[in-house]
Amino acid sequence: MELFQYTAHQLQNLLKDKEVSAVDITKAVLARMDAVEGDVKAYITQTQDSALEQAKAVDAKIQRGEVISPLAGIPGAIKDNICTLGIKTTCASKILADFVPPYNATVMEKLGQDTVFVGKANLDEFAMGGSTENSGFYPSRNPWDLTTVPGGSSGGSAAAVAAGEAIWSLGSDTGGSIRQPAAYTGLVGLKPTYGRVSRYGLVAFASSLDQIGPITRDVTDCAHVMNAIAGYDAKDSTSIKVDVPDYTKALVNNIKGLKIGLPKEYFVAGMDPEVEKAIRNAIDQLVALGAELTEISMPHTEYALSAYYLIAPAEASSNLARYDGVGFGYRAAGNDIVDMYKKTRSQAFGTEVKRRIMLGTYALSSGYYDAYYLRALKVRTLVKQDFDRAFEKVDVLITPTAPTTAFKVGEKSSDPLAMYLQDVCTIPVNLAGVPGISIPCGFANGLPIGMQIIGKPLDEETIIRTAYTFEQNNDYHKRFAPLGEVK
């Protein structure tokens, strides 16, 4: 096995035993980037020089006998909608193509100086999309099959880890944008409880839905990243002021007595039969390992998608109003200020972003607010109440992460509704604000299948324990994308 194929915790052990150096690991990942990035296109900005300097600093600490953090010296990728001091943060949009933030996002500060960053990962523009085809620069590709998408909007973050161009990454999840790419690329992706991880420095798409979270090779790495980034932040008014547990203590291979709920509404029409088969086989395994299964009903699930595509665009319409060519970002020449506004936004925003801004503005406009936006908020409450009732009976819910495996590049780009339907299993989790994790549970036609485990608010520990138990009794997480064999 090459160094770029190891997990973060395996590499950390090698570092502590001085069998390899942080520079060795970083050079291996950078060489991998040089070899495959032309095919995968996981990154918008690469930071190879600064990554090597960070690695050298970690090695110096180890030589001095200093204690290092679990992610120290382990190369990671950061989604390019998370602000990085002195490094371009574009949101994959031409309107921010040259924007360099004057500050770090809180998660960057929490990760600290010892963490090696190799680049800013590609995404759907302003995180609006499910395939990374809406990037203002170029689409990313799925390392399992370069003719397919890596998912979105955190497609670059997932593709980088799956291809060995990073050992771990950060993404953001507004309606499934961590979990769905993780499912498509055979990785672990966790969307924390809303408010568990600070959003300060995350460029806003839909502020009541956005959350930052990890994409990793296995559940152990996921727990380590969560330990690094979770916690209260006074700079984020939606941050929850509660103690953060040590998530690595949830890495227990035991789910005896765990109550699993199987919501029948998540096995939707049009679901790939191979996906459903893999999920049901995984559930059978969990039951064999001691879990108790209960089929439940969450009747408002069918309305979640519609509610989301009113709430999220409405919030996007408000958040993206700041990109007008005046304060920062791209500015077009115009005959007057109104003409400049119009040309700036017309030229620099992509089709999907314009679609959502227009939909959101319409939903918030006079005469339509009550009919659309307010009604969508009421539906959101009903969806949350479904979860509340379910968790009175069970500890976790299990569903598919996506109804299909990764689809072909270009297959759904001309049909926005078909693209939106890929989020049907993940969106309710964001509306309810509860945590969810996707882990690999099978393959269909050589492409990974993801299983979603949903937990109670602030109970990431139970979904991590469930995911870890399943993982330890299977080997899906040990399989590496065949791109590694081709190159």
Image (cartoon, grey):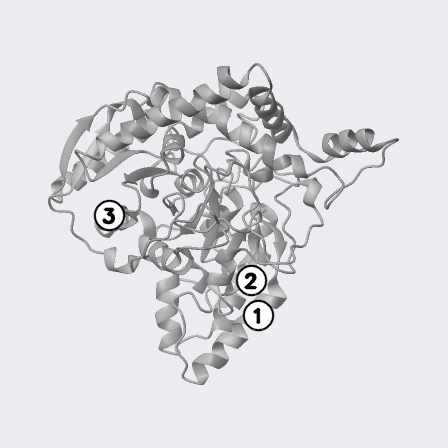
Q: Residue furthest bottom?
A: 64
Residue on which disc 2 sits? 30
Can you give x and y, in whole percent of width and height, for residue 106 in the image? 50, 57
Local packing at callout 3 (Cα closer than 10 Å; few below 14, some 14-19, many 20+) is many
Residue on which disc 1 sits? 52
Q: Amino acid at mark 2?
A: Leu
Residue on which disc 3 sits? 462
Identify whether 104 is placed above or below 266: below
Can you give x and y, in whole percent of width and height, for residue 204 in the image? 55, 41
CA separation, marks 1 and 3?
37 Å
CA separation, marks 1 and 2?
9 Å
Which comes sooner in the sequence, label 2 or label 3?
2
Local packing at callout 1 (Cα closer than 10 Å; few below 14, some 14-19, many 20+) is many
CA separation, marks 2 and 3?
35 Å
State yes or no: discs 1 and 2 in contact (Cβ < 8 Å).
Answer: yes
Q: Quadrant of the N terminus?
A: bottom left
Q: Nearer the viewer, residue 70 or 383?
A: 383
Can you give x and y, in whole percent of width and height, for residue 78 in the image? 53, 53
Residue at position x 20%, y 40% in the image: 395
Q: Name the element at disc 1.
A: helix
Local packing at callout 2 (Cα closer than 10 Å; few below 14, some 14-19, many 20+) is many
Identify whether 299 is placed above or below 107: above
Res. 479 visible in picture: yes
